[in-house]
Image (cartoon, helix red, strand yellow):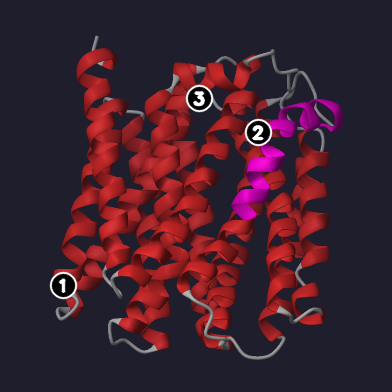
Amino acid sequence: MAVTSVTDAQRWRGLIAIVISVGLAGVILGLFAPLIALKLEHREISTTWNGINAAMPAIAAMVVAPFLPGLTVRFGLLRTILAGAIITVAVVPLFVVFDQTWVWFVLRFVMGVGGMMHWVTTEIWINATVADRHRGKILGANAAAFSAGMASGPLLLGFIGTEGTLPFIIATGMVALGAVPLVFAIGTAPPVHEPEKGAFMDAVRRAPTPMMASLVEGFLFVALLVLWPIYAVRSGFDESTAITMLAVIVVGQVVASFPIGWLADHMNRKLLLIANGVASLLCALLLPVLLDSPVMLYVMLFLWGAASAGLYTLGMVRLGETFAARDLGSATAVFILVTQIGSVAGPVLGGAGMDAWNPHGFVVVTALVGALFCAFAIWRYVTVEKR
């Protein structure tokens, strides 16, 4: 239940509970995405179809996103988060019950509905609660918690393996566990407002560079999560090493998120966002050259993860400073909707690129996307935002 006035202690209690819940959601995603991708690879599904399967949650998110601002107004932030958790915990065991590949496409879609409800609502909660002088640090801490969960997911999967029902049982337990901290958030949710007509398009018009950053981050995030293990295996690494490499990417996201958020509270946020885009582009260009240099390869993977995490964190910080509380719900929904568009495009185009040029077409596609963002962000800064 949302309240109009809470004490500082209540506000921080709610924030901590939400951040813990976000971290546990990261574990689920970090375990589940490579688990399904590798299982479909074992079934000799093409990387294009594998990418489409990975894109199903994002497609679901695009369908659901326009309705979420109104849903949070009607039911409140906390109830919406809990509803998303219930949907997810009901769907995960069905992957074991229904083993047909086509059914997994449907289940991934439904799982995406629950995940989107959790994601949008927690981001609205945090951004609407924090003061602007602390916005970068708190959003960075939230991103670090999610990324820490993401890093734990592949490591956990590497330990338990991809065979049998155990990974699905653990994923179900993690979803249920993620709902427990929300008990401590009762009565601390910030108020939400009915979105105005045309708010979605207005959000894109008022914050095009953050929205573009969201698009690219979604593209890179899911493309790496789903296709990097396949790219690494096809480049000569064994499956266990490929999963470890994925974990290194996510560790980069964990370690960098809070420092990037801290920097966002102490320097020009627009230039910092451009710097992250340039770093991500350079990492994509250098990776194929470093496949035979293990130490440098791991360093570059770490930096790639750090740069991609910065795109999302800084985009969300820019969003919070641009929009007032009344418009923030719709703006956040649009921001994450754009992320999901990138999430659909990432594995599909990356997989198609890998099919066209095995395996380096994947890297070519990610580099092209990074170059487009850098060009757009620099153009916007020089022509509009600097003034």
Label 1 element class: helix
- Vertical position of residue 21 compared to residue 295: above or below: above
Q: Amino acid at mark 2?
A: Trp
Visible residue check, residue 85: yes
Answer with mark 2 or mark 3, whichever residue precedes in sequence: 2
Image quarter in which the C terminus is found: top left
Between the C-alphas of marks 3 and 1, the distance is: 38 Å
Q: Amino acid at mark 3?
A: Gly
Residue 286 location, x and y as percent?
Answer: 16, 62
Between the C-alphas of marks 1 and 2, the distance is: 41 Å
* Range drawn in magenta: 57-76
Quarter of the image for residue 356 reads: bottom left
Q: Amino acid at mark 1?
A: Leu
Q: Are marks 1 and 2 in contact (CB under 8 Å)?
A: no
Residue depicted at x 81% and y 33%: 187
Disc 3 designates what residue? 320
Residue 214 location, x and y as percent?
Answer: 44, 39
The residue carrying pointer 3 sits among few (fewer than 14), some (14 to 19) or many (20 or more) residues within 10 Å by Cα, namely many
Q: Residue furthest front?
A: 356
Image quarter in which the N terminus is found: top right
Residue depicted at x 62% and y 17%: 199
The residue carrying pointer 1 sits among few (fewer than 14), some (14 to 19) or many (20 or more) residues within 10 Å by Cα, namely some
Visible residue check, residue 17: no
Residue 376 location, x and y as percent?
Answer: 28, 30
Is 62 colored magenta in this rendering? yes
Disc 1 designates what residue? 290
- Vertical position of residue 318 compared to residue 306: above or below: above
Judged by depth in the image, the label closer to the viewer, 3 or 1, is: 1
Label 3 element class: helix
Answer with mark 3 or mark 1, whichever residue precedes in sequence: 1
Which label sits on residue 125? Answer: 2
